Image (tube, helix red, strand yellow):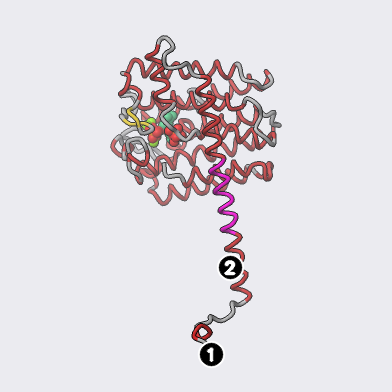
């Protein structure tokens, strides 16, 4: 008997063979999903950046100071999650990316960037770092930063008004986004209650109101707009709305978690800021473990809402997973 044979391991049992086979197939699907996610995020980011470059005034257009300030914040990086969600919702409805939808995505990113510029102002969160760069008011002064936020908002509506979908859908999209960023259950309403809740321990209902309004509302409007742009049926829009609300709330819970678990370098914004400002956050009210559990439950609800779309919604499902697992 040769030396090799002496060390031969016993033949695996059929049960072991089947466990190995299912682990292999799990790993295989994980590799496919990861590369699909990477492609979706990278392609989405490129398309969005190209549309933003086309739509935003150049840095030398008069008055140059404000155009430079707008571009400083818009082109500082950013995950481009809202445009990507809008485009993928359009794909889930239409089966392919509808022509011109990237302009709606780019306008959503303008609105989101406006909300970040204002969120960072001394009168609001008073932050110095955003997307790895000095905040807009640090780089350009407070007056220009306020106006750059305003300008990104008005520019966004000009783009929505010119978008290439049927006029009825265009009007619905404008209404949806204006509501999602407004005062009643929208972004501004959420920001108001967020500020008013500093240094207090809010109840669960108020905390959920803040997160649904300041963050989930624009994320939901982004997903719903993509569906409307692609001519989605009422039932499809309803399911996209459920998906958007679940991932939107989970997104802000994860943002709160990252604030206490990551470094400023990893985040590109000041870590530990929520604790310092005694903000109303999920980790502050429920602790990290319970916050993670809630985000995971919301991921399940989000994926359930996508069932009616079948395999067309796979990108939306992998994005939802990414939003929960992200590190910045
Ligand atoms: C940050 O949004 C503000 C929140 C609503 C939590 P993102 O995490 O999408 O920020 P960027 O766009 O990638 O910089
Ligand atoms: C901001 O929430 C939500 C917005 C409407 C911009 P945060 O204040 O937690 O966002 P970050 O952590 O500064 O990005
Ligand atoms: Mg804030
Ligand atoms: Mg902030
Ligand atoms: Mg935060």
Give the residue drawn at x 42%, y 17%: 59
Q: Quadrant of residue 317?
A: top right
Q: Is residue 19 visible?
A: yes
Give the residue drawn at x 64%, y 38%: 239
In the rendering, which numbered label is found on residue 1?
1
Give the residue drawn at x 65%, y 27%: 99
Please identify the residue farthest to the top as the structure is shown: 62
Quadrant containing ligand 2 reads top left
Mark 1 closeness class: few <14, some 14–19, many ≥20 residues within 10 Å: few
> Within the magenta stretch, is there residue 36?
yes
Q: Is residue 37 left or right of residue 283?
A: right
Q: Which residue is mark 2?
A: 20
Please identify the residue farthest to the left as the structure is shown: 276
Q: Nearer the viewer, residue 304 or 223?
A: 223
Please identify the residue farthest to the front as the structure is shown: 2
- Residue 306 in percent (x, y) is at 64, 42
| Label 2 or label 1, whichever comes before in sequence order | 1
* Rendered-image quadrant of the C terminus: top left
Q: Nearer the viewer, residue 190 or 164?
A: 164
Question: Up-down: is 48 above or below 37?
Answer: above
> Within the magenta stretch, is there residue 181?
no
Q: Which residues are magenta?
A: 26-39
Question: Up-down: is 97 above or below 154?
Answer: below
Q: Secondary structure at mark 2?
A: helix
């Amino acid at each position: 008997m040769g030396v090799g044979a002496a060390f031969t391991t016993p033949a695996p049992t059929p049960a072991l063979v089947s466990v190995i086979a299912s682990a292999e197939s799990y790993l295989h699907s994980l590799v496919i999903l990861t590369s699909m996610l990477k492609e979706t995020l990278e392609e989405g980011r490129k398309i969005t950046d190209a549309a933003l470059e086309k739509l935003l005034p150049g840095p030398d257009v008069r008055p140059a100071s404000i155009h430079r300030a707008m571009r400083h914040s818009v082109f500082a990086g950013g995950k481009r999650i809202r445009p990507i969600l809008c485009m993928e919702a359009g794909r889930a409805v239409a089966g392919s990316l509808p022509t011109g939808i990237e302009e709606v995505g780019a306008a959503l990113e303008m609105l989101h960037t406006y909300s970040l510029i204002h969120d960072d102002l001394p009168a609001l969160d008073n932050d110095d770092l955003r997307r790895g760069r000095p905040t807009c008011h640090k780089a350009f002064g407070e007056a220009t930063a306020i106006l750059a936020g305003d300008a990104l908002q008005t520019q966004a509506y000009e783009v929505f008004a010119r978008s290439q979908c049927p006029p009825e859908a265009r009007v619905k999209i404008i209404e949806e986004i204006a509501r999602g960023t407004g005062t009643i259950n929208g972004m501004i309403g959420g920001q108001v209650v967020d500020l008013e809740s500093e240094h207090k321990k809010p109840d669960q209902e108020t905390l959920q109101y803040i997160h649904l309004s300041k963050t989930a509302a624009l994320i939901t409007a982004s997903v719903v707009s993509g569906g409307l742009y692609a001519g989605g049926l009422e039932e499809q829009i309803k399911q996209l709305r459920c998906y958007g609300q679940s991932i939107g709330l989970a997104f802000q819970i994860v943002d709160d978690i990252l604030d206490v678990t990551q470094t400023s370098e990893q985040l590109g914004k000041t870590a530990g800021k929520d604790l310092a400002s005694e903000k109303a956050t999920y980790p502050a009210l429920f602790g990290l473990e319970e916050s993670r559990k809630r985000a995971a439950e919301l991921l399940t609800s989000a994926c359930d809402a996508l069932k009616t779309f079948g395999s067309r919604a796979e990108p939306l499902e992998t994005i939802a997973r990414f939003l929960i697992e992200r590190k910045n």
